Image: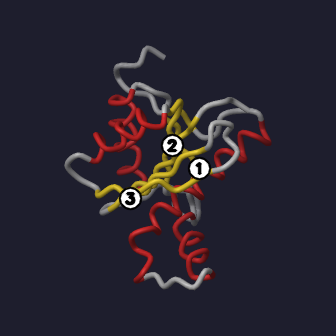
Amino acid sequence: MRTGVRLGVDVGKVRIGVARSDLHGMLALPIETVPRGLGDLDRIQALVTEYEVIEIVVGLPLSLKGTDTASTDDAREFAARLAALVQLPVRMVDERLSTVSAQQALRSSGRTTKNSRAVIDQVAAVIILQHALDAERSGGNAPGSFVRTGNQGL
């Protein structure tokens, strides 16, 4: 397992959930919910700097059948812009049912969807990142697919 803090990102149309790992990549923790729109990439860049992040994991919202959706294209475009800005490895991992899992986890803790809007995206980011951390720990390889930008010579 590689050492270093990873950032988990759940991209939504209105909000972006952000989580981070511990230094050893064992545990994902919620950070904040960033409003989607003007300044969202700058805020994520500030979190990358603050937590000395080595890699970003962005959720890839696929349909239950594993096919692309309108949200898939949006997440890919966001991840590409993020990768160009932060100049760090950005990976996309399958996030199917992460929001549903987040809603179930919050419901089981006694919270309703209505009073959980502020944190549900953070919980989804935690689920996405924890899944990626667990996959790397069990498989030995970084999870998901690498996001390439036009200014990366890879």
The answer to whether residue 125 is left or right of residue 104 is: left
| Quarter of the rendering occupied by the N terminus | top right
Residue in the picture at 45% in, 52% down: 18
Of the residues shown, which amino acid type is indicated by label 2?
A: Leu
Q: CA distance from mark 1 to mark 3?
A: 15 Å
Residue 120 higher or lower than 79, as above or below: below
Amino acid identity at mark 3: Thr
Where is residue 107 drawn, in percent x and y?
57, 82
Write down the residue under mark 2.
7
Where residue 88 appears, as percent x and y from the top left, is 46, 27
Q: Residues within 10 Å of mark 1 (few under 14, many from 20)?
A: many
Percent coordinates x, y for residue 101 in the rendering: 60, 70
> Helix or strand or loop: what does disc 2 sit on?
strand
Q: Is residue 114 above or below residue 135?
A: below
- Residue occupying the point 61% across, 51% down: 28
Considering depth in this image, is 94 or 82 the residue closer to the camera? 82
* Gap in angstroms between the C-alphas marked 2 and 3: 13 Å
The Cα–Cα distance between marks 2 and 1, rounded to whole angstroms, is 7 Å
Q: Is residue 127 found left or right of 34 in the rendered image?
A: right
Give the label on residue 129, or none: 1
Q: Are marks 2 and 1 in contact (CB under 8 Å)?
A: yes
15 shown above or below 103: above
Q: Which residue is mark 3?
A: 33
Q: Name which quarter of the figure residue 25 lies in.
A: top right
> Tag 1's secondary structure?
helix
Residue nearest the viewer, comparing 85 with 22 = 22
Residue located at (56% from left, 69% from top):
102
Residue at the spot 72% in from the left edge and 45% down from the top edge = 135
